[in-house]
Image: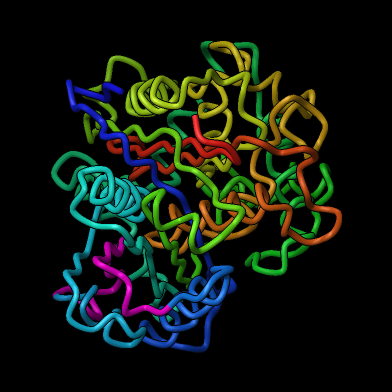
Amino acid sequence: MKGLHGFQASMVDVAVVGAGQTKYGNHPLGLKGMWAEAASKAFSSVDGDFEPTSIDEAFIGTIAFGGAQLGNTAALLTEHSGMDGIPVRRVENACASSGFALRDAWMAIKSGQADVVVAGGIEKMNDLTPERKRYWLGVSGDTEWERLAGLTFPGTYALMARRYFHEFNADHDDLVHVSVKNHLHGSMNPAAHIQKEVSFEKAAGGFMVADPLTLYDCCPTSDGASCVVLAADHVARKLTDTPVWVNGSGAASDHLALHDRPSITQLKATQIASSRAYSMAGLTASGIDLAEVHDCFTIAEVLATEDLGFAKRGDGGVFAREREGQLNQGSTTVNASGGLKSKGHPLGATGTGQVVEVFKQLRGEVESGRQVRDAQTALTHNVGGSGATCAVHVFGRDRS
């Protein structure tokens, strides 16, 4: 099977055999404690006999928010979860860090260099002052042309939203529908940062953050960690009877600064990454039962539904308005976990946190009332910054 840029994918298939995370929100533990909790949950979720000594390598995504442990972050964490002596690496691609950690782990197995690999992510965000938070959130934008000019990420996505409203038949009410849906889903998720529903009226009337985005259009800053165990096919079947197969992996990049992009109402990196993942999995968007998409702001989910192929160009607002992504309403449930908007967004942990949700959904292990009916296929979409990097993965209960 031929992958991107002529890469000849080996005949080794890769499966997720375990996955776990902390609750997102204001976590009482530090980096070591959060990672130990997520790793322990991931290891204990493996059905068969499993010991961390069987892990060949680990990739951990993090921005190292606040600078608490900028160097050797991965080694600091793995020494507290039984992975002694193995090769470890910190992966940084802004908010897409652990999505790319997952891809690196997948490639390590695909290449034949490893049989069992851990991918994960972590971020401790809520022990900083608001001013320091703004600084560390801003480092993922273009420093020269955006951050030093005073542009924040809410401001960046506000520009994208305004342009989208100008180009298409959409308005702020469409974004409100995204917020209401994701709060509904998150209210049923015990791991979510914000576990409460919000009415349309309340979400529409939130205080302005960056016009037209209000408080209810913005995800929270969260503490959290997530961990996923991947295994080659010949190992996976020894560990579980219900593996979740990674049937497609795609990644891409784009200009960092908005002003360098031909359009700010679509993310080229998402389009390219998803095309590669779909092609590898032998699927199209219509074949995806549930998707965890990167809704750091509500406009981001509207754009993602178009870029991933769930809605036509310019119809993302209609998709939201008609509740196509609501749990078991349309053909594809979008953000059954609550998404970044409600589940939370601990930057480095978000990508593999999406995989934790997919793993449980495809195995029928989520909480009562939150299960996507007859789910056979799933997608995760993890974006860095305002779209400069993106990793997309396609999963299935069966191999492609």
Residue 186 highlighted magenta (yes or no): no
Answer with left or right where residue 313 lies relative to residue 92: right
Q: Residue at x 29, y 38 (%)?
A: 389
Name the one closer to the observer, 318 or 270. 270
Residue range of the region highlighted in magenta in the rendering: 51-71
> Residue 139: horizontal and vertical position, in percent?
24, 55
The structure's colour scheme is rainbow
Residue 67 highlighted magenta (yes or no): yes
Q: In the picture shown, does residue 70 fall above or below 183?
A: below
Q: In the picture shown, does residue 304 fall above or below 46?
A: above
> Residue 231: horizontal and vertical position, in percent?
39, 56
Q: Residue at x 38, y 41 (%)?
A: 13
Q: Residue at x 26, y 45 (%)?
A: 107
Asked whether residue 100 appears in the rendered view, the answer is yes
Q: Residue at x 51, y 25 (%)?
A: 162
Residue 269, located in which quarter of the rendered image?
A: top left
> Residue 186: horizontal and vertical position, in percent?
72, 56
Q: Tag count in the figure? A: 0
Answer with left or right where residue 222 lies relative to residue 93: right
Name the one closer to the observer, 73 or 314. 73
> Residue 86: horizontal and vertical position, in percent?
19, 74
Name the one closer to the observer, 280 or 163. 280
Residue 397, located in which quarter of the rendered image?
A: top right
Residue 149, located in which quarter of the rendered image?
A: top left
Asked whether residue 212 appears in the rendered view, the answer is no
- The quarter in which the N terminus is drawn is top left
